[in-house]
Image (cartoon, grey):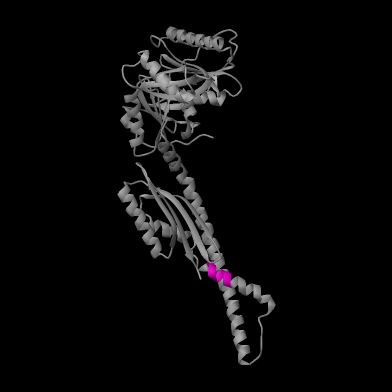
Amino acid sequence: MGFSYKHIYLELDGRFYVYKSSKVEELIDLSDVAREGVLVTDFPGSITRVMEVGSAPKFAEVMVRRQIEEEGEFDQAISIIPYWRRKRAKNSTQIFLTALPHQIYEQYMNHVQEAREPIVLYSLYGVLCEVVKRYGKKGPVAVAFQHGKVVDLIVGTPKRIYSANRSMAFDETADQIDALWDMVLSDIRSTESENKIKVGKVLLVSWVDTTPPKWEGDLGFHLEPIEEEVLEIQGERHKASFFRLIKGLSPGASISRGIEKWALRSRVAIIPMNLFILVATILVFLGHMYLSNKVKALETDYQRIVQGLSWGEKLQVKAEIPPQYIDTLGFIKRLHRAAKFPSYKTLINDLAESFGSQMTVEMLDANYGKSELKAEIRGHIEAPFDTAYKAYQRSMIILNRKGYEIQDSSFSTSIRESRFLLKLSKTVK
């Protein structure tokens, strides 16, 4: 099932775009990528390839970095983005990766980390690799994405990537684009020959300027365009399938660090969680009203019985509680005791009044016993350590004033946030 992003940002061939509700607008630069969503970039100045290095998988990135630096591909320190790796022999690993200058890599990572709203980062080839995983379950497939005078190509299956290549024409004239697609077909044939495989399907991912290949004859594979959608760009309508692919991606498969992935998951989960809490609160309120009315009716019966017994005592008539009322009286006592418990709504309100705006509750588990309410709360505080710890201490003091006893508590901190655990109880007599 696809993930719902508010905004989809795309950096392609040096230009930035933002997609929302089938409308695409062009942006100026990376600084305009600021709202909640996902950013897909082709990382200017990067190279992407499948390599084989003489090491175990856990050392593959180190070996790749050294090999690329020795080949003189870059004149500065580089970063490696690995998408897939596979052990080929005892000291041999095949790895599919993108390499780019470390300075550029850190620029993007820092931007999404410092953004005020959650943004997850994908590389273009990471997206195409996910397409291979999605469509290549029955055998090798090729994924080709043509934009302008460039075609990005990946050939593989969900378990192995055989090749990745970027082909480029001199310009965007019809003859040059036809020649470009001939180069792509040649790459597919070479990959089949070198790896002794048969590509069963070539998936075409389109952009607004994509021109499909004019391949003729028996190709030996199915040419399958990804379903397109109509886009509105600067008042004009175009068709493209690229953004459809992004809608099917999960933050868990991005190259962002863990905190950005979970921040977006949490933000998206707020709406259904709020709806759940609202429905639960309504049900608890209705249940409380029903039980309150039931208690009042039973208390009336109880008082009538007590008055009858008192009248009997005055007449010095020895009377016992009829057996049929023993269970009823026990039920009345239990309801009377239960009515003294704070309702679930009251508990939530007490926590809201005790916790400041910086404290976020991730989990609340409340259990009502015969005479004791027990609650466990987990959450985090997005604030510097001193501020976070003061807020944490203040919340415990307020909860104590409200009649809750702190059974257990813990507080831990890291660079970005502090985490807390509280176990509360409230006894009713």
Q: Position of residue 60 (x, y in %)?
A: 45, 22
Q: Nearer the viewer, residue 231 or 60?
A: 60
Count of labels in the image: 0
- Of the 4 image quadrants, the one containing the N terminus is top right
Q: Position of residue 178 (x, y in %)?
A: 47, 9
Q: Nearer the viewer, residue 323 or 385?
A: 385
**Within the magenta stretch, is there residue 295?**
no
Magenta-tinted stretch: 333-338
Q: Which of 153 and 86 is in front in this view?
A: 86
Q: Position of residue 4 (x, y in %)?
A: 47, 36
Is any part of residue 179 visible from this angle?
Answer: yes
Q: Please, which residue is most extreme toward the right here? A: 323
Q: Position of residue 210 (x, y in %)?
A: 45, 17
Relative vertical location of residue 275 with respect to residue 162 in this rendering, above or below? below
**Within the magenta stretch, is there residue 335?**
yes
Residue located at (50% from left, 23% from top)? 85
Q: Is residue 307 left or right of residue 25?
A: right
Q: Is residue 162 left or right of residue 99?
A: right
Q: Please, which residue is most extreme toward the bottom here? A: 315
Main SS, magenta region, reads helix
Relative vertical location of residue 306 with respect to residue 219 in this rendering, above or below? below
